[in-house]
Image (tube, helix red, strand yellow):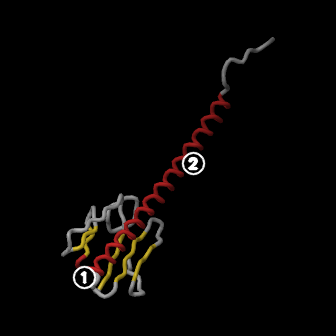
Amino acid sequence: MTRNKKGFTLIELMVAMGIIAAIAVLSIVGIQIVQRSLRNTQRTAVLNDFNLYIAGYFNDNGVYPTTAQVTFSATAITVAGTSAVTLRAATQFATSTSANGTDYCYVSNGSSYSWGVQKEGGTAVHITTSGTDCTF
């Protein structure tokens, strides 16, 4: 008696589906890691851009903007009393660092400043002239 095999067995189909599911899970995790890294890179870029703005502000005015002059809104960082500098980021300026928001801090008395960003994962990046980091 000869048998002609004309299809896949149930075990072969289950193994193939298991492999496809594993590849899908690994792809999703990889994409999330890349997205998180991109958001953290954008946060660092905003930090550096604003630091350049602060240096220019100091050159023009002889003092750094005070803490009260710097405002974090849902879409921008603005400095009062200037021509409305607006630095936008792909992540919103929120009270916590997550995929939906970023925690920035700025502390200044006019003669020195501390400026930082809290990245996803808990690490913080600071730029300071006072030797002390602002706290989140």
Residue designated by label 1:
61
Q: Which mark is residue 6?
A: none
Point out residue 2 in the picture as x, y percentages from the top left corner: 79, 12
At 63% across and 34% down in the image, what residue appears? Answer: 16
81 lies left or right of 36: left
Amino acid type at circle 2 is Leu
Check disc 2 and report its element: helix, strand or loop.
Answer: helix
Q: Is 133 in front, or is 66?
A: 66
Check disc 1 and report its element: helix, strand or loop.
Answer: helix
Q: Is 79 in front, or is 104?
A: 79
Point out residue 40 in the picture as x, y percentages from the top left corner: 44, 63
Amino acid type at circle 1 is Asn
Q: Earlier in the sequence, mark 2 or mark 1?
A: 2
At 26% across and 65% down in the image, what residue appears? Answer: 86
Q: Residue furthest front?
A: 60
Point out residue 113 in the picture as x, y percentages from the top left corner: 34, 83
Quadrant of residue 20 within the rendered picture: top right
Labels 2, 1: front one: 1
At 59% across and 43% down in the image, what residue appears? Answer: 23
Residue designated by label 2:
26
74 lies left or right of 91: left
- Report the quarter where the N terminus lies: top right
Q: Residue furthest right?
A: 1
- Report the quarter where the C terminus lies: bottom left
Mark 2 is surrounded, within 10 Å at the Cα level, by few (under 14), some (14 to 19) or many (20 or more) other residues, namely: few
